[in-house]
C-alpha cells in the first residue's frame, strides 16, 4: 500500500522531520538502526525506559518481542516484513505494548521506525510511569479510554451501592412481612410457609416434625382486669417462654390473639412431646407480675405428628392439632394432648 | 429525569445546608423516601419541584442556587476528575466542552446533559451556548466553569450571558490560563480510592 503524496519534494518532508517533530507526533516512537540499537525515541518512551543511557543500547535490553519468529536472531531480522508487533517491557513484563513498524530507507537500510502504544494495560502504565496527557498523541484514544475506565468504575460503585440498599430493603420488608409486630415471633404467614415447606420436605425424605397448637387459658380475664397493656406484656412473655423452651431450628408463631403454634423439627417421640408440653405449661403458669398486680394464666396444647399420616397435609394436621387442643380444654385445661390421624375424640392420647 | 441530577441537588443541599434543610425540602415536594437513587429515573416535574422548593427554603434566587450547584458538582472528586480529563489546561478544557454531552452519554446513555457549543469571540473571550432540556443549565455551567477555573489555576471572568430568547449562554474571559498552580491532577486514579 502506498500513501498518496502530492509533494514533489517529499525528501524535504523526510529531512525536516527531526526527532522533536517525530516525538510530537508520536510520543512513543522508536528508531532502531540496522543492528537493532536505539537511535532515537519519543519523549514518553524516554520516560518509560527511565534514566540511564538509552541511545545506543540494544532493543532487547528493554523489550521482549512477543511471538518472535522462530529461529531468527536479531531484532531487525525478527521484525522483517511485519506491520503489527506486540512487545512487553523487561522491567514490567505484565505491561504490554503494541505498535507498527516501518522501514527507514530502501530495504530498511537506515533501520526501522516503530510507533508504540499501550494496550489494555494503559491504566497500570500511567500509574507506574507517572504519564500525563502530554505523553499521548492527541490522536491517541488513550485519554478517552482512561476517562471511560474511571467513569465506569464510578457508575459501577453507585450501582453496587444501590444493589446493597435494595437487598437490605428487600430483606427487612421480607422479615417485617413475616414477623408478628407485638411479640417479634413469626406470624401466621411465616408459619403457613414454614409448614408447607416442611410437608414438601417430607416427600423428599426430609425430617418428620410435630405441630403444636398452644392456646392460652384465662388470658381474656388478664386483658379485662389489668388492661391491654398488661395483656400485651403477657403475650410478649409467652413468646419468650416458647422460644426458650424450643430449639433454634423450631418455629414459634403467633397466629391469633392468644394462640401460638410451634413447629418442632425431628420431635416425634410422644413421651418427649408430652414432657415438653408439661414444661411449657408449667412455665406459663408461673405468676405474672404487672406493676403491682399479679395474675396467673395457663395453656392448653394439642399436638399433631407428621409420621401419623400417610400423606400429611397442612389442613389435616392443623385440624387434628385443633381437635387435640379442644380435648385438652375439655379435660380441664392446662394440659397437652396428642392427636392420632383421622381420629375422633376417642382416638386421642391425652 | 436521571436520578443523578436529583441526587446531586439533594447532596448539594445536605452538604451545604444540612440534613434538616434537605428534609424540609423533601417534605415540600412530598418526597418521603430516604433520598434519590442516582441510578434510577424520576419524573421530570419532580426535579422542577425540587428546585422550586429549594429556592423557597433558602430564599435565594434560582440563578444563584443553580450556580452554587454547578460549583458544588465540580468540587466532588469523581466529577472533578472526569472533568479534568477534558484537557491539560483551562483553555483545552474549554475546547473540550463541546464533547461533554457525548462523554456523559458514553458513561450513562440516558443522562441528559445539555448540548454545549463554544464560540471564540476574540482571542481569549468565549461564549458557551448551553442548550438543555430544562432551563437553568446555563447557571449550572457558570458555577461549574468558575470552579474548574480555580481547579486549573486559571484566572478568568465568567458570567452568565444574555442570550437570545429561550437560549442560555455563559461568557468566559480567560485572562491567564496558568495564573497559579491549581489543584493536582494525576491521570492515574489515586490508589485505594474506590471512586
Image (spheres, grey):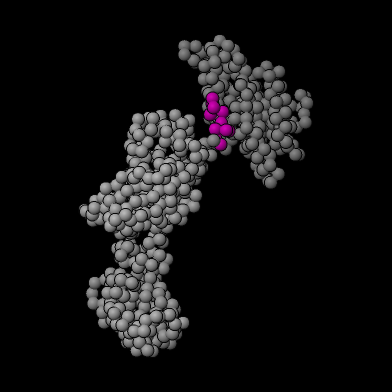
In this rendered view, identify the residue nearer to me: A347 or B51: B51
Look at the picture and state if B30 lies above or below A153: above
Residue reaching furthest to the front: B164
In this rendered view, identify the residue nearer to me: A166 or A18: A18
In the rendered image, residue B42, in percent from the top left (x then y), is placed at 50, 40
Secondary structure mostly taken by the magenta-highlighted segment of the chain = loop
- Say how many tags the image has: 0
Residue A197 appears in the picture as rendered: yes
Residue reaching furthest to the left: B180
| Res B58 quadrant in image | top left
In the rendered image, residue B31, in percent from the top left (x then y), is placed at 47, 33
In the rendered image, residue B49, in percent from the top left (x then y), is placed at 45, 34
Residue at (70% x, 30% y) in the render: A318
In this rendered view, identify the residue nearer to me: B119 or B78: B119
Q: Magenta includes B29?
A: no
Look at the picture and state if B105 lies above or below A70: above
Residue at (57% x, 14% y) in the render: A223
Residue A209 appears in the picture as rendered: no
Look at the picture and state if A295 lies above or below B87: above
Q: Give the range drawn in magenta.
A: A174-184
| Res A144 quadrant in image | bottom left
Residue at (34% x, 84% y) in the render: A9
Amino acid at each position: 500500500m502506498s500513501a498518496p503524496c502530492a509533494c514533489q519534494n517529499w525528501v524535504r518532508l523526510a529531512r525536516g522531520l527531526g526527532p522533536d517533530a517525530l516525538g510530537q507526533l508520536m510520543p512513543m516512537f522508536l528508531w532502531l538502526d540496522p543492528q537493532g540499537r536505539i537511535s532515537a525515541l519519543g519523549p514518553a518512551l524516554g520516560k518509560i525506559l527511565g534514566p540511564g543511557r538509552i541511545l545506543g543500547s540494544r532493543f532487547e535490553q528493554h523489550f521482549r518481542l512477543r511471538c518472535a519468529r522462530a529461529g531468527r536472531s536479531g531484532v531487525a531480522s525478527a521484525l522483517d516484513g511485519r506491520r503489527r508487533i506486540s512487545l512487553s517491557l523487561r522491567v514490567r513484563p505484565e505491561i504490554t505494548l503494541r505498535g507498527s513498524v516501518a522501514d527507514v530507507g530502501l530495504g530498511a537500510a537506515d533501520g526501522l521506525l516503530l510507533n508504540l502504544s499501550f494496550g489494555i494495560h494503559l491504566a497500570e502504565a500511567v500509574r507506574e510511569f507517572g504519564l500525563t496527557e502530554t505523553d499521548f498523541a492527541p490522536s491517541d484514544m488513550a485519554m478517552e479510554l482512561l476517562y471511560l475506565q474511571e467513569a465506569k468504575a464510578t457508575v459501577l460503585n453507585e450501582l453496587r451501592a444501590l444493589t446493597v440498599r435494595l437487598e437490605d430493603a428487600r430483606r427487612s420488608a421480607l422479615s417485617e412481612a413475616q414477623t408478628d409486630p407485638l411479640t417479634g415471633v413469626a406470624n401466621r404467614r411465616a408459619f403457613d410457609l414454614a409448614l408447607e415447606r416442611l410437608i414438601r420436605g417430607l416427600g423428599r425424605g426430609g425430617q418428620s416434625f410435630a405441630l403444636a397448637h398452644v392456646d392460652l387459658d384465662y388470658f381474656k380475664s388478664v386483658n379485662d382486669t389489668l388492661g391491654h397493656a398488661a395483656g400485651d406484656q403477657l403475650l410478649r412473655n409467652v413468646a419468650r417462654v416458647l422460644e426458650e423452651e424450643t430449639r433454634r431450628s423450631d418455629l414459634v408463631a403467633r397466629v391469633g390473639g392468644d394462640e401460638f403454634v410451634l413447629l418442632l423439627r425431628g420431635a416425634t417421640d410422644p413421651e418427649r412431646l408430652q414432657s415438653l408440653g408439661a414444661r411449657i405449661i408449667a412455665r406459663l403458669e408461673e405468676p405474672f407480675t404487672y406493676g403491682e398486680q399479679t395474675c396467673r394464666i395457663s395453656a392448653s396444647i394439642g399436638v399433631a405428628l407428621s409420621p401419623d399420616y400417610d400423606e400429611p397435609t397442612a389442613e389435616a394436621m392443623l385440624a387434628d392439632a385443633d381437635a387435640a387442643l379442644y380435648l385438652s380444654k375439655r379435660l380441664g385445661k392446662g394440659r397437652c394432648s396428642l392427636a392420632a390421624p383421622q381420629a375422633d375424640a376417642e382416638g386421642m392420647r391425652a | 429525569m436521571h436520578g443523578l441530577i436529583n441526587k446531586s441537588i439533594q447532596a448539594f443541599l445536605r452538604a451545604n445546608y444540612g440534613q434538616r434543610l434537605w428534609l424540609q425540602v423533601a417534605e415540600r415536594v412530598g418526597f418521603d423516601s430516604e433520598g434519590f437513587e442516582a441510578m434510577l429515573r424520576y419524573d421530570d416535574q419532580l426535579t422542577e419541584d425540587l428546585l422550586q422548593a429549594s429556592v423557597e427554603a433558602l430564599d435565594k434566587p434560582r440563578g444563584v442556587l443553580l450556580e452554587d450547584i454547578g460549583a458544588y458538582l465540580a468540587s466532588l472528586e469523581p466529577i472533578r476528575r472526569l472533568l479534568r480529563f477534558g484537557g491539560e489546561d483551562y483553555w483545552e478544557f474549554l475546547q473540550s466542552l463541546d464533547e461533554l454531552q457525548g462523554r456523559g452519554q458514553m458513561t450513562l446513555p440516558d443522562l441528559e446533559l445539555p448540548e454545549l457549543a463554544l464560540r471564540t469571540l476574540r482571542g481569549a473571550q468565549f461564549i458557551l451556548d448551553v442548550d438543555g432540556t430544562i432551563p437553568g443549565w446555563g447557571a449550572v455551567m457558570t458555577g461549574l466553569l468558575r470552579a474548574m477555573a480555580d481547579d486549573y489555576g486559571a484566572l478568568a471572568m465568567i458570567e452568565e450571558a444574555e442570550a437570545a430568547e429561550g437560549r442560555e449562554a455563559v461568557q468566559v474571559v480567560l485572562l491567564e490560563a496558568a495564573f497559579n498552580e491549581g489543584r493536582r491532577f494525576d491521570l492515574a486514579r489515586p490508589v485505594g480510592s474506590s471512586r
